[in-house]
Structures are given as structure tokens and as C-alpha cells.
Image: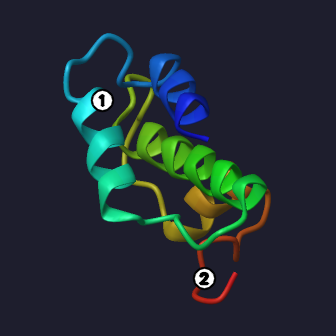
Amino acid sequence: MWSSLASALNVSLHAGQEETVPLCDRLRRAGVLGSVMSETAVRTLHQAVQVLTGLLGPEQDGARGRGELAAMATGSAHGLDDGT
């Protein structure tokens, strides 16, 4: 799961940046996804990377709404709503 996050970060806006390793380590130590099944955790981490890339990436071209970010990351405009 964590190697999958590292791989996703390496091809995202964070490629080559030193803070990606501490970010992964902090998430792992905090147990953020400890009670979640591995498959769900990997999908959630990849969606988070997609949202960060949409907000902060080099191709970011202005403000984006929550629905647009959700659709980009999850395939549904409601994918970032509570309980989804």
C-alpha cells in the first residue's frame, strides 16, 4: 500500500521533492488507514494524490470546485462527499 503511494507521488506534482518521504512516513505512523482494507486504502491514497495534483499541480489553471475535483479524482461529482 505504501509503495503504491510512493509510486503515485513520484509521477505526480511531487516527483523528486524531498517532502514526499516524510509525508508517507507521517501517514503510516498516524495509522490513518490502518483499519481500512488494503484495496480501499490504495484507492483512497491515489484519489488524494489526484486531488492534490488538481489543486497544486503544474497544469492547474485556476480555481476548481469541489465537484470538479471529485469528478477528476473519483469519477463522480459526489466522490468527495462525506460518507462516500
- Per the model, the C-alpha gap separating discs 1 and 2 is 26 Å
Instruction: State the image quarter where residue 7 is shown.
Output: top right
**Picture layout, residue 48 above or below residue 31:** above
Q: Indicate left or right for 68 with 37 as reference.
A: left
* Element marked by disc 2: loop
User: Counting residues from the N terminus, which is met first, the one under dot 1 or under dot 2?
Assistant: 1
**Image quadrant where one finds the C terminus:** bottom right
Disc ID at residue 81: 2
Disc ID at residue 57: none
Bin the neighbour count of mark 2 within 10 Å (Cα to Cα): few under 14, some 14-19, many 20 and up.
few
* Camera-side residue of 77 and 49: 49
**Residue type highlighted by circle 2:** Asp
Bin the neighbour count of mark 1 within 10 Å (Cα to Cα): few under 14, some 14-19, many 20 and up.
some
Q: Indicate left or right for 59 with 36 as reference.
A: left
Residue at 60 percent across and 82 percent down: it is: 81
* Camera-side residue of 26 and 75: 26
* Camera-side residue of 76 and 16: 16
Instruction: State the image quarter where residue 23 is shown.
Output: top left
Residue at 64 percent across and 57 percent down: it is: 41
On the image, the x and y values in percent for residue 47 come to: 61, 51
On the image, the x and y values in percent for residue 32 come to: 42, 66
- Which residue is under mark 1? 20
**Residue type highlighted by circle 1:** Thr
Residue at 50 percent across and 42 percent down: it is: 49
* Element marked by disc 1: helix
Residue at 35 percent across and 24 percent down: it is: 14
On the image, the x and y values in percent for residue 24 come to: 36, 40
